[in-house]
Image (tube, helix red, strand yellow):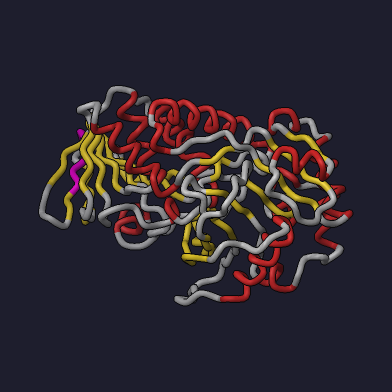
C-alpha cells in the first residue's frame, strides 16, 4: 500500500514508522525544513506515572515500543531513567502515599522514598523535600534529535521518502485512493492519506474536516547550559499532582482545596518538570494557557518561579539559562479522548489532539491507527 503522511511532527512520523515497518511505502510531507512545533518544544518525556488508569495499558505499550525503537535507532536517545516527584507539603505527601498504595502502583513503578533514598538514586538532589515518589518506568528521549534519527532509519528501508519545505495544499479523494497536491505543484498519488497537522486546526485541516473537537494549549519552557553533574532521573514537583489524571482522587481534591500552590503557579497552571538532555543541559517547564488569542511574547514571572523551585530541590544555583521558548499543542476537548481521528473521505483521515501526550504516546497511536485501518 502507498501512503502519504502530511505533517512531520511526532504523530506524523509515528504513523509513517508504523506503516513502513509493516511493509508499506510512505511519502511524508513537512511544510517546514524540519518539524518546529510541539514535537521539538517538549521535555522528551515518556511519562507513564501520571497517565489516567483508562489509558495506562496504552501508555505502557507505547513505553515498550519506544524501548524497541531505541534499540533499533540509538539516535532517538531513549533512556529508561525513571522519575522522582519531590514532595514538599503534607498534602502532597498524602497524594504520594495514595499513589504508592494504588492498584496500578506496580505498573507505574511507584515507590515512596525517604529523602536519603531519593539522594541515593539521584545524588544531584541536595535540596529540601519531605519525600520522593519514584517511578522506575518513566523514560526520556531526545525530542530535537528523535525525528531526524527516525527518518534516517526509515530511509534505509527503501520504502520511505521525506519532503521538507513542502506544504500540502489540497487532498482529493479519487474513489480508489487520494491525490495530494503540494505548494511546489507536485502531485502524490496514494492509497491512503493521513493528515497529522499538530496545532494547525485551520487551513487544510478545516477544509478537510471542518471544526473538530480540539483546542490549542500554549506553554512556556526553558533550557540551561550543561549541569556539571548527572541528573539521573527526571524530576517533578508536587504541583504536577494537580494536572495529571493518574493521581486523581480525594487526596488531590484536598491538595487543591488547601490552595497551597503559589499565586504565580496557580495563575499560569504550572508544574515543575525537569529533564537532563544528553548534552547536560536541563529542560525545565512548564505553564499551561488555554484561552486564545495567545500572547506573542514570553512572561518572565513563570521562569522566575521555575528557577526558584528547581534551585530549592537541587540545593544549588542553576546553570545559566541559554534559551527560552513558547509552544502550542493540540488537545482533544473531551478528556476521555486520547487522540481525535476524523475521517475526511474514504481514503483520507485527519489525526490530531493528543495533547501533551504526543511524545509519550506517539508510537502506540501510530500503531493503533494502523490497526484501525487494517494496514
> What residue appears at the point 60 percent right and 48 percent down from the top-left corner?
229
* Placement of 262 over or under 213, stated as above or below: below
Q: Quadrant of the N terminus?
A: top left
Of 138 and 3, nearer the camera is 138
Residue lying farthest to the front in this orientation? 228
> What residue appears at the point 16 percent right and 57 percent down from the top-left corner?
183
User: Quadrant of residue 83 in the image?
Assistant: top right
User: Quadrant of residue 156 in the image?
Assistant: top left
Q: Position of residue 120 (x, y in %)?
A: 75, 38
Please indicate whether residue 320 sits to the left or right of residue 125 in the image: left
Q: Position of residue 330 (x, y in %)?
A: 48, 55
User: Within the magenta stretch, is there residue 178?
Assistant: yes
Please indicate whether residue 267 sits to the left or right of residue 78 in the image: right
Residue lying farthest to the top in this orientation? 23
Of 306 and 326, nearer the camera is 306
> What residue appears at the point 38 percent right and 37 percent down from the top-left corner?
75
Residue extent of the magenta highlight: 175-180
Visible residue check, residue 213 = no
Visible residue check, residue 113 = yes
Q: Position of residue 197 (x, y in %)?
A: 36, 52
* Placement of 127 over or under 342, stated as above or below: below
Q: Quadrant of the C terminus?
A: top left
Q: Position of residue 41 (x, y in %)?
A: 46, 56
> What residue appears at the point 25 percent right and 34 percent down from the top-left corner?
26
Please indicate whether residue 282 sits to the left or right of residue 296 in the image: right
User: Within the magenta stretch, is there residue 142?
Assistant: no
Residue lying farthest to the left in this orientation? 185
Amino acid at each position: 500500500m502507498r501512503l502519504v503522511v502530511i505533517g512531520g511532527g511526532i504523530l506524523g512520523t509515528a504513523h509513517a514508522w508504523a506503516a513502513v515497518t509493516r511493509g508499506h511505502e510512505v511519502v511524508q510531507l513537512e511544510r517546514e525544513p524540519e518539524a518546529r512545533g510541539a514535537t521539538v518544544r517538549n521535555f522528551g518525556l515518556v511519562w507513564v506515572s501520571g497517565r489516567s488508569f483508562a489509558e495506562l495499558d496504552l501508555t505502557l505499550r507505547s513505553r515498550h515500543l519506544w524501548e524497541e525503537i531505541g534499540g533499533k535507532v540509538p539516535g532517538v536517545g531513549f533512556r529508561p531513567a525513571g522519575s522522582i516527584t519531590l514532595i514538599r507539603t503534607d498534602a502532597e505527601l498524602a497524594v504520594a502515599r495514595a499513589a504508592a498504595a494504588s492498584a496500578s502502583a506496580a505498573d507505574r513503578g511507584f515507590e515512596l522514598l525517604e529523602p536519603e533514598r531519593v539522594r541515593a538514586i539521584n545524588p544531584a538532589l541536595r535540596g529540601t523535600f519531605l519525600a520522593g515518589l519514584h517511578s522506575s518506568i518513566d523514560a526520556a528521549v531526545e525530542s530535537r534529535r528523535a525525528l531526524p534519527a527516525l527518518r534516517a532509519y526509515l530511509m534505509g528501508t527503501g520504502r520511505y521518502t521525506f519532503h521538507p519545505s513542502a506544504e500540502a495544499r489540497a487532498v482529493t479523494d479519487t474513489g480508489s485512493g487520494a491525490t495530494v497536491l503540494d505548494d511546489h505543484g507536485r502531485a502524490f498519488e496514494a492509497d491512503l492519506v493521513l493528515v497529522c497537522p499538530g496545532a494547525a486546526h485551520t487551513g487544510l485541516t478545516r477544509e478537510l474536516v471542518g471544526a473538530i473537537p480540539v483546542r490549542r494549549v500554549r506553554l512556556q519552557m526553558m533550557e540551561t547550559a550543561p549541569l556539571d553533574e548527572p541528573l539521573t532521573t527526571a524530576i517533578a514537583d508536587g504541583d504536577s499532582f494537580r494536572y495529571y489524571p493518574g493521581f486523581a482522587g480525594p487526596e488531590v481534591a484536598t491538595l487543591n482545596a488547601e490552595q497551597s500552590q503559589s499565586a504565580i503557579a496557580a495563575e499560569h497552571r504550572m508544574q515543575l518538570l525537569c529533564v537532563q538532555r544528553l548534552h547536560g543541559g536541563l529542560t525545565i517547564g512548564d505553564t499551561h494557557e488555554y484561552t486564545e488569542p495567545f500572547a506573542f511574547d514570553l512572561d518572565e514571572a513563570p521562569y522566575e518561579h521555575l528557577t526558584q523551585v528547581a534551585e530549592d530541590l537541587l540545593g544549588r544555583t542553576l546553570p545559566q539559562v541559554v534559551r527560552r521558548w513558547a509552544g502550542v499543542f493540540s488537545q482533544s476537548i473531551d478528556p476521555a479522548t486520547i487522540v481525535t481521528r476524523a475521517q475526511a473521505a474514504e481514503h483520507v483521515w485527519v489525526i490530531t489532539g493528543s495533547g501533551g501526550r504526543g511524545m509519550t504516546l506517539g508510537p502506540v497511536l501510530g500503531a493503533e491507527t494502523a490497526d484501525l485501518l487494517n494496514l
